Amino acid sequence: MNTEQFLEIFKEINSAVLIEIGVVIALAMAIIWCSQKLLPLLAEHLHGKQRLFVLALIPTVRVLVFVFAIIWIVPLIIEPTARNMVAILGAAGLAIGFALKDYVSSIIAGVVAVYEVPYRPGDWISVDGTYGEVKHIGMRAVEIVTPDDTVVFIPHLKLWSNLIHNANNGGPSLMCVVDFYLHPEHDANQVKHLLEDVALTSPYVQLAKPIVVVANEEPWGTRYRLKAYPIDPRQQFQFMTDLTARGKTCLRALPVNFAQLSPEHAVQPAPY
């Protein structure tokens, strides 16, 4: 398309057209401003789902007003011929396709997820440090609920470049790990057997699965990792709390001293 053909797309702009465009823009901005002021005031007098519905209308109204303004203004500037419309729609389609490339990629990744099954409803997964239970798998994103009861939507696009940690992988078994840090002067075998008994006597433990205690000597003391499985993955936090509370009580009764970690050792990765 040369310069003359490009200029033929546009109408002749006169003062009346400019005034009409200005009025449309001003009217659109006024409606958006009013919706952002009045709808929150209305929502304050409502409760429950009605309040949330009214608040959700704020961005919807803004988008609708923007779309109607574009539909009104475009014919004032561009000659609505078949050739012009094809050219405009082609350019708009290219721009929209570029803008939505991540959305399309997420949809494709969602199709891949149906066959590879990296997660299912009921699985406990961790993506980019966000951990929670999978509640729903949509075309674009997976919905998880964190232990703090926060709903997080993770695009399937993460499949291409991120590690997906699946704690139970579609099964009823999920390993829980509880750490204990002790002063090195103690009977390691006695502590090991005590922690095994703590897990065995928990009301949440799944007895069909193994209970393992791993000890590791560190410069500041001895680190114990108690590994066991709750009856239901949803009980993992009650289970870990129970093991921690009763484990500390039993260790104090031996007695043993807990290690005092220095700041550089306070946070460290779990290598096993």
Image: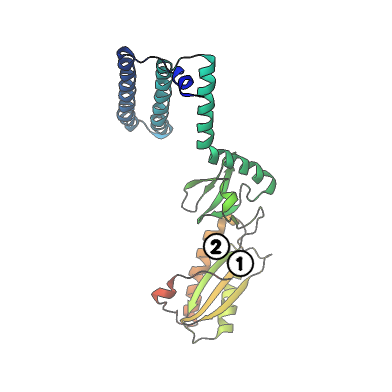
Q: Residue at x 59, y 69 (%)?
A: 227
Q: Mark 2 touching mark 1, by CB under 8 A?
A: yes
Q: Is residue 160 above or below residue 72?
A: below
Q: Quadrant of residue 258?
A: bottom left
Q: How far from the left and from the top, in percent, is residue 211? A: 63, 70
Q: How far from the left and from the top, in percent, is residue 177? A: 56, 67
Identity of the amino acid at label 1? Ala
Q: Is residue 159 left or right of residue 37?
A: right
Q: How far from the left and from the top, in percent, is residue 140? A: 57, 40
Lower position in the chain sequence, tag 2 or tag 1:
1
Residue at numbered disc 1: 228
Quadrant for the C terminus, please.
Answer: bottom right
As rendered, which of 233 and 27 lies closer to the eye? Answer: 27
Identity of the amino acid at label 2? Phe
- Give me the C-alpha separation between circle 2 and circle 1: 9 Å
Q: Residue at x 54, y 47 (%)?
A: 144
Q: Confirm whether residue 138 shows in the render.
A: no
As rendered, which of 256 and 32 lies closer to the eye? Answer: 32
Residue at numbered disc 2: 239
Q: Secondary structure at mark 2?
A: helix
As rendered, which of 61 and 217 lies closer to the eye? Answer: 61
As rendered, which of 264 and 201 lies closer to the eye? Answer: 264
Q: How far from the left and from the top, in percent, is residue 204? A: 58, 62
Q: Which mark is residue 8?
A: none
Q: Is residue 182 above or below residue 1?
A: below
User: Foreground mark, 2 or 1?
Assistant: 1
